[in-house]
Amino acid sequence: MDRLTTLLQRRMESVNQRFASPLRSKRLTVVLGRWLGIAFSVCFLTGLFSHLLQDPPGWMIFLTRPVWLYVATQGIHITTGIASVPLLLAKMWSVFPELLRWPPLKSVVHGLERASIALFVAASLVEVTIGLLDTFQWYPWPFSFKDVHYWLAWVVIGSLALHIAVKLPIIRAHWSRAAEAAAARPVAGAGPAAREGWNRRGFLVALTAGTAVVVLATAGQSFAWLAGLNLFAPRRMDTGPQGVPINRTAAQAGVGEAALAPDWVLTVASHTREKTFTLAQLAALPQYSYGLPIACVEGWSQGAQWRGVRIRDLMATVDAPADAELQISSMEQGGVYGRSYMPAAYSQDEKTLLALELNGAPLDLDHGYPARIIAPGRPGVLQTKWVKKVEVL
C-alpha cells in the first residue's frame, strides 16, 4: 500500500509539474472567481425572473412597463450565460494543479472544500452546456430542459455559496491589489515578480477581449443596437415571415388545416356568458396598433408593429370582471404550447392584443394566423399562437 501511495504521489507531482505555469496564482484565481461569481449571479436572478413569469407563485407582481422589460432581462440572461463559458474554463484552468495535490483528502474541511468544487464544476458545466444548446433549440436528452435548468441553477448557486464560505480566508487574503503586490515579492526559485504580474495581467486582458468578442458576436439576437455584429447566434433580427423570426411553425404544431379552415371561430367565455366571433367579426371590432417586442426564452427578440383587438375590450363583451385571470387555448393540441394563463395585470393592459395583423399585413400562418396573443413584458412562449378560445378561469 505504501509503495502504491508513493507511486501515485510521484505520478501526480509529475503531471502537476508538466502543467505548471507562472501565470497561475491565488490572486488570479480570486479575480476569475469574482468575475464568474458576478456572471452566475446575474444569470441566476434573470433566469429566476423568467421562470417565475412562466410559473408564477401567488405573490408574483407582474410588470407590463417598460414593454421591453423581458427583452432586457432575458437578453442579459443569455448574454451573461455565454460570457460565463470562457470565464468558467479560465477558472478551471487556474485551479487545475490543485486537483493533483497529494494527499487528495487532508481533513474534513479539505474534503468539504473539494466536494464543493466538484459539485460546482459539474453542475456549472452541465448548466451552461444545456443552456447553450437551448438557444439552438437542440435537446439531445430525455429530460425536461426547463425543469432541469431551473433546479440545476439552484445547485450551482448553492455550491458556489458553499465554496465561497470554505475559501473565504483565501479570498480575503488575495482580494485587493495590495495583497497581490505583497504576493508578488521575489521568492527563492521564482522569476521577477513584475514580470509574472505583467503576464497575469496580459492573461486577464486576453480573457476579457475573448469574452467580449464572444458576447458581441452573439448578443445581436437580443439587442437591436448590436444586431450588425451578430455573427454566431442562431437567430437574426428582421428575418423570417413578415420580418420576424419564429421558433415553432404551424407544421410543427400540426395546426395548418385547422387554422386555415373557413369555419374558424374564436370563443370568448366568462362564468356567465359565452360568445363566438368569426375573423370578419373580430376585424369589425375597434382595432388598435402598437409597437411591441416579442422576446423568447432562447434569448432572441424582435420589435414589430401589431394590430388587433384589445383583450380587455374582448372580455367586456361577455361581462368578464376586470380582475379576472384568463386561460388562452390554442388550436395546438397537447404540450406546453397548448394553453397559457394571463393574469389581470396583462389582460387589463391597453397594449395587450388579440393580434390579427403583423407589420401591416394579416398574420402569417407561422406567426399564429388567424389570431394570436401579444402582450407587453411577457415571454414569447406565453404569447399563444393560433388562438381558439379565451376564457375566465
Image: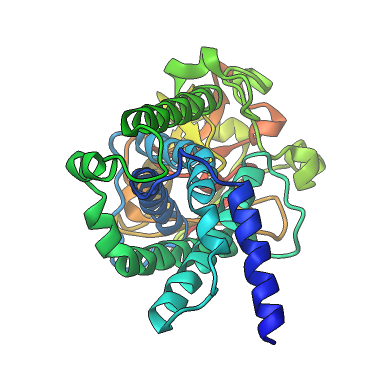
Q: Residue furthest top?
A: 228
**Image quadrant where residue 31 sits:** top left
Q: Residue at x 54, y 32 (%)?
A: 300
Q: How many numbered discs?
A: 0
Q: Position of residue 354 (x, y in %)?
A: 50, 38
Q: Nearer the viewer, residue 120 or 225?
A: 120
Q: Nearer the viewer, residue 78 or 93?
A: 93
Can residue 338 be seen by looking at this rendering? no
> In the picture shown, does residue 193 fall above or below 15?
above
Q: Residue at x 40, y 62 (%)?
A: 160
> In the picture shown, does residue 17 fall above or below 354?
below
Q: Residue at x 61, y 22 (%)?
A: 236
Q: Is residue 21 left or right of residue 59?
A: right
Q: Nearer the viewer, residue 356 or 40?
A: 40
Q: Position of residue 199 (x, y in %)?
A: 42, 29
Q: Position of residue 38 (x, y in %)?
A: 34, 46
Q: Residue furthest front?
A: 188
Q: Position of residue 252 (x, y in %)?
A: 78, 43
Which quadrant is home to the N terminus?
A: bottom right
Q: Is residue 327 left or right of residue 251?
A: left
Q: Residue at x 63, y 52 (%)?
A: 130
**Image quadrant where residue 192 sits:** top left
Q: Nearer the viewer, residue 44 or 120?
A: 120
Q: How is the image coloured?
A: rainbow
Q: Residue furthest left?
A: 178
Q: Is residue 174 left or right of residue 93?
A: left
Which quadrant is home to the C terminus?
A: bottom left
Can residue 318 be seen by looking at this rendering? yes
